[in-house]
Each structure stands twice: as C-alpha cells, then as structure tokens.
Image (cartoon, grey):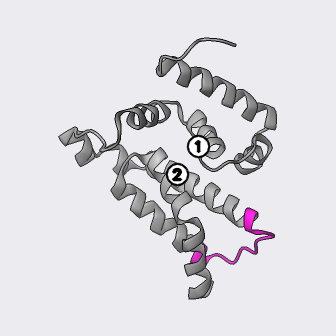
Amino acid sequence: MRSEEEVERAVERHSDTVRRLCMIHLKNYADTEDIFQTVFLKYALSSVLFESEEHERAWFIRVTINACKDLLKSFFHSRTVSLDELTEQPMELPPDHREVIEAVLSLPQKYRDVVYLHYFEDYTAPQISHILGKNANTIYTLLTRSKRMLRKKLGGDDYE
C-alpha cells in the first residue's frame, strides 16, 4: 500500500490524463468520476514499482483503459441510459471543437485510443504500441486509417 503523499503526487500528475481517457471512452461525467476513483484506488493499493515516470504514466493509461472497458462490458452499464441521452442536451463547446470531438468519439474504439494517445498525450507510435501491447506498424496503420475517417467525417479533402 502506498503512502498518502505518493497517492497525492500521482493524482496531481495523472488526474487530467485519466479523466480525459475516461471521457473519451465513457462519454459520461458520472462514470468518468467512478473510474477515476477506481484507478487511483488501484494505484494506492498496488505495490508495483515503476522504473520511471513514463512507466508510471503508461501504467495509469493501461489501467484506465481496462477499467473503462470493464465498465462498458458490465451488465449494469448495458441496461441503463444516461441522463444526458434522456435530455439530449448538446455539449457546451464552440461549434468547431464540438464537431471535432464528436468525430473522434464516433470512431471505433481501437481508433479512438490511438488518436487520443497520439494527438492529446503526444505519444509516438512505438510508445503507443508498447502501452497498448500492439505492433508499431499496427499503430501506424490505425493512425492512418483514423485520419482518413476523420477527414471524411469532417468534410476534408480526400487525398493520399
């Protein structure tokens, strides 16, 4: 079990990343907060020794993605409807941002993860391949395909 100071430092360092990943996967604030707490509780109770700050960050990303997937597969989650869906209120973002975010969120999950890690967390394809446990060439392919899909969804030029 980790000390309170270690947990507080980890929350300061990784809270934004964990929340953003959760929102990309879950699209729901309440579920995001639940997974956020779950991830940091796992960290507090874990005895994993990290080789570097980058190793620790990768651990948080992997645990967050797995926790989100577990929640999405759960019986409870598949049988509920969020209040957001019931009220159908649009997100409070500038129109151009909303369109891009909605396009990214509409991508299949395997593309969303790669796009998020590359464009929002500034990971390279080899780093993403290590985090997700996939071949680097697969990551390059997923990035290329996701760019093509986003270009099509956002009405960009169709070159390449």
User: Is residue 94 found left or right of 64 in the rendered image?
Assistant: left
- Horizontal and vertical percent for residue 27? 39, 45
The residue under label 1 is which amino acid type?
Tyr
Number of dots carrying numbers: 2
Q: Residue at x 50, y 34 (%)?
A: 104
- Horizontal and vertical percent for residue 113? 59, 42
The residue under label 2 is which amino acid type?
Leu
Circle 1 residues within 10 Å: few <14, some 14–19, many ≥20: some
- 111 or 97: which is nearer to us? 97
**Which image quarter holds the N terminus?**
bottom right
136 in relation to 26, above or below: above
Q: Residue at x 53, y 56 (%)?
A: 67
Write down the residue under mark 1. Answer: 116
**Which image quarter holds the C terminus?**
top right
Q: Quick one: label 1 or label 2, which is nearer the N terminus?
A: 2
Instruction: Give the CA distance from mark 1 to mark 2.
Output: 8 Å
Write down the residue under mark 2. Answer: 21
- Label placed on residue 92: none
Q: Residue at x 72, y 45 (%)?
A: 128
Secondary structure category for the residue under label 1: helix
First to last magenta residue range: 43-54
Q: Verify CB contact (< 8 Å) between mark 1 and mark 2.
A: yes
- Horizontal and vertical percent for residue 7? 58, 79
- Horizontal and vertical percent for residue 36? 47, 64
Q: Residue at x 46, y 33 (%)?
A: 100
85 in relation to 68, above or below: above
Q: Does the stretch in magenta take in 29?
A: no
- 13 or 68: which is nearer to us? 13
